[in-house]
Image (cartoon, helix red, strand yellow):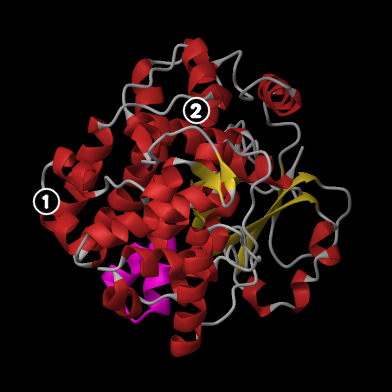
Amino acid sequence: MTEQLLQFIWQFRYFNLQQLATTQNEILQIIHSGNHNTNQGPDFLNAKIKVGNTLLAGSIELHLKATDWINHKHSTDKNYNNVILHVVWQNDKNIGLPFPVLELQNRVSVLLLKKYAGIMDTKSFIPCEKHIGALPALTISSWKDRAAAERMQQKAAYIQSLLQQNNNHWEETFWWLLARNFGLPQNADAFEAVAKSLPITILAKHKNQLIQTEALLLGQAGLLNEDFAEHYPKMLKKEYLFLQKKYQLPAIHIPVNFLRMRPANFPTVRLAQLAALIHSSVHLFSKIKETTSLKEIIKLLQCTANDYWNYHYRFEKETTVKPKSPGKQMSGILLLNTVIPVLYTYGLLNKKEEYKTRAILFAESIAPEKNSITANFGHLGITCLNAYDSQALIYWKKNYCTEKRCLQCSIGNKILKPEKG
C-alpha cells in the first residue's frame, strides 16, 4: 500500500461502504469525500460526513498509519485545524485525536490490490499492457484527447515563460522557439541561448546580407573560434568579430554538440539553414498568424543553406555535393514544436478560439510521427492517425506510463475500478 493508492481508493470510494464505523465504533456516513488537494494542507477539502447524529464539514487527512499524524507534526500545523476525519490504512495506535478515525485495510478488495501491484511491478512497454486490450475504444480515444490537450498546455506554459522574459513580444518569442527547435534535442538549449543573444532588431538590420546573418549565428554558437584555412569560414569569422564588437554581444556558455548525430543534423548545418530562413522571411510569425493554409506555412519555412554548405557538413571538411535543406522530417518538427504551439498559445492568451482551433486542425492534418513509442502502441491496437495522435501517445508514454502514474490516468482508473457485484 502507498499513500497515493490510499488517496485514490478514498477519492473514488473503492472500499466497502456498508456499515461504516469509526475506530470508536461510531456509525459513520460519508456524504462527500471532499476535493483532492494537491497543494499544502490536508489531502481532501470541503468534505461532509455524519458521525452518529452529528453532521461535520471540513477536511480529511489520509495516512498509512495513525501514528503518521504525529510523525508529520500535523498537530502543530494550523493548516490541519479544520480536519474532521483521519482515514488510515492501519490504525496502529490510538493517538487521542479530537476527531474520528476510519481504518480501511479490511474494506478494500484484495483483487484491486493485486492488480495494482501487478501493474507497478511490470516491465512491459506500458504498465497496463495486459489489460488495455479489454477496454472500450471510446475510453482510449478520450484519454488520447486528454493527453494531447495536456501536451498543448505544457507547451503553452513554456511559451508563456518566454513571453514573460521579453515583455510579451510575440515575434521575439517565435524566433527563440524556432531557433530552439532547429537545434533538435541535442542542441536545443544552446540554440535558444544563441537566439536570446541576438534580438530580432539586430537580425533585421543584417537579414539582407546572408553572410552576416550566418556569421552572427555561427559566431554566437562558438563555431568560429578556430584558425581557418578556407576562405569562407575566414570571411565569416571576420564579419562576426566586427559585429560582435559593434553590438557587444554576450558570450554563450552552452556548447553545441556533434557527437552521435547524423551529419544532416550537425549544428553547423542547422544554423546555416536557420540563417537562410531569416534571410528569406519578414515578420514570420505575423505571416503565419494570417495564413490559414498549412501548405503555405510549409512554404514559409522552406530554406536552403548557403552554397558553401552544398559541399560541407562542417568547416574545412569537404564532402560530395548535396544542397542542405531542412527536409520533410525537420519541417514536421518545426510545425509541431514551434508553429502549432505558438498559434495555440496566441489564441489561448488573447481569447481567440480561431487560432486554437486552427492549431489543432493543423496537427490533425500532419502525418503521425514514426518512432518506437507509436510503433509499440500500434502493436497494442491503439491507432495513430495523425500528428495530433502521435503527440498524444508520446506524452502519454513519457508522462504517465514511464512514471507509472496509473492512478492519475483514465486508463489506469478504468482498469483498477472494482467490478460490481
Residue at numbered disc 2: 411
**Residue furthest out toward the right:** 93
Q: Choose between 281 and 405: the one closer to the eye.
A: 281
Density class for disc 1 (Cα within 10 Å; few <14, some 14-19, many ≥20) is few
Residue bearing the label numbered 1 = 291
Q: Position of residue 343 (x, y in %)?
A: 24, 55
Circle 1: element type:
loop
Q: Is residue 17 magenta?
A: no
| Residue 352 placement, left or right of 421 | left
Q: Write the residue at 29% across / 47% down.
A: 303
Report the magenta stretch's main SS: helix
User: What residue lies at 30% left-to-right and 61% top-to-bottom?
Assistant: 278
Range drawn in magenta: 158-175
Q: Quadrant of residue 397?
A: top right
The residue carrying pointer 2 sits among few (fewer than 14), some (14 to 19) or many (20 or more) residues within 10 Å by Cα, namely some
Residue 172 position by quadrant = bottom left
- Position above or below: 79 against 227: below
Q: Is residue 102 left or right of residue 269?
A: right
Which label sits on residue 241? none
| Up-down relation of residue 223 to residue 266 (above or below) | below
**Which quadrant: the N terminus?**
top right
Frontmost residue, 269 versus 363: 269
Residue 163 sits inside the magenta stretch: yes
Where is residue 34? Give x, y as percent.
50, 54
Residue 185 rendering spot, x and y as whole percentages: 55, 48
Q: Give 401 or 338, whichever is nearer the viewer.
A: 338
What residue is drawn where x is 36% and y is 35%?
Answer: 327
Q: Nearer the viewer, mark 2 or mark 1?
A: 1
